[in-house]
Amino acid sequence: MRDGETIFTAAVAIFLLAALAGDAALQGHGLRVLGFPAAIGLVTAALCFCRIVNRARTRDPAAHADSGSPWNWHAALYMLALLAVLPCVYLFGLIIGLPLHAAGCVKLRGEGWIVTIAASLTALLAASIIVVLLGVQQPRGPLVWP
């Protein structure tokens, strides 16, 4: 992992912790609701911090050199594909949108149909648990079913 990727990951973890702190202050949610995401954010931020400190201690200049070009088109395409979950879930709801998005991302990576169907079924199971068992309401977009 390059230094910029480590710093970006740490920034996302810190943003997550700030959002959770804001939720606790504004909504009054306690550790029962926010404990797991807060623990993940703290562990991620701590690991990134340790990695940055270890990289700073390394005296070898080759260890700090980033490999490859500064702009990776494949990584940008995959990031856009991951962000496509938002319109998919808005348009189709969780039950259809999440498996559809998972199938699209897996096919974009060049996987075969068996892996794509397995990923889609896994996303369908996760979305079904969220909507049916946990009772979370789906977004009400224009193509939402049911």
Image (cartoon, rainbow, N blue to C red):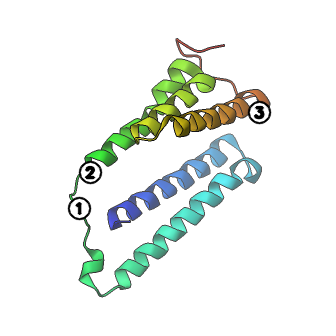
Indicate which label's residue lies in the foreground, 3 or 1: 1
What is the distance, in whole Å, between disc 3 and disc 1 at their CAs?
44 Å
Q: How many marks?
A: 3
In the rendered structure, are the residues bearing label 1 and label 2 in contact, judged by CB atoms less than 8 Å apart?
A: yes
Q: Secondary structure at mark 1?
A: loop
- Against 128, residue 32 (above or below) is below
Please tell me in which quadrant of the rendered image residue 35 appears.
bottom right
Residue 48 in the image: x percent, y percent?
A: 47, 68
Residue 73 in the image: x percent, y percent?
A: 26, 46
- Residue type highlighted by circle 3: Leu
Where the N terminus falls, by quadrant? Answer: bottom left
Of residues 67 and 57, which is closer to you in this image?
Answer: 67
Please tell me in which quadrant of the rendered image residue 44 appears.
bottom right
- Against 14, residue 74 (above or below) is above
Where the C terminus falls, by quadrant? Answer: top right
Of residues 42 and 54, which is closer to you in this image?
Answer: 54
What is the distance, in whole Å, between disc 3 and disc 2 at their CAs?
39 Å
Residue 30 in the image: x percent, y percent?
A: 74, 50
Q: Residue at x 25, y 73 (%)?
A: 65
Return the residue found at the far bottom. 59
Residue at image mark 3: 134
Q: Secondary structure at mark 3?
A: loop
- Against 83, residue 62 (above or below) is below
How many neighbours does mark 1 have within 10 angstroms: few (below 14), some (14-19), or many (20 or more)?
A: few
- 85 vs 40, left or right, is left
Circle number at residue 72: 2
Residue at image mark 1: 68
Q: Residue at x 71, y 28 (%)?
A: 131
In the rendered structure, are the residues bearing label 3 and label 1 in contact, judged by CB atoms less than 8 Å apart?
A: no
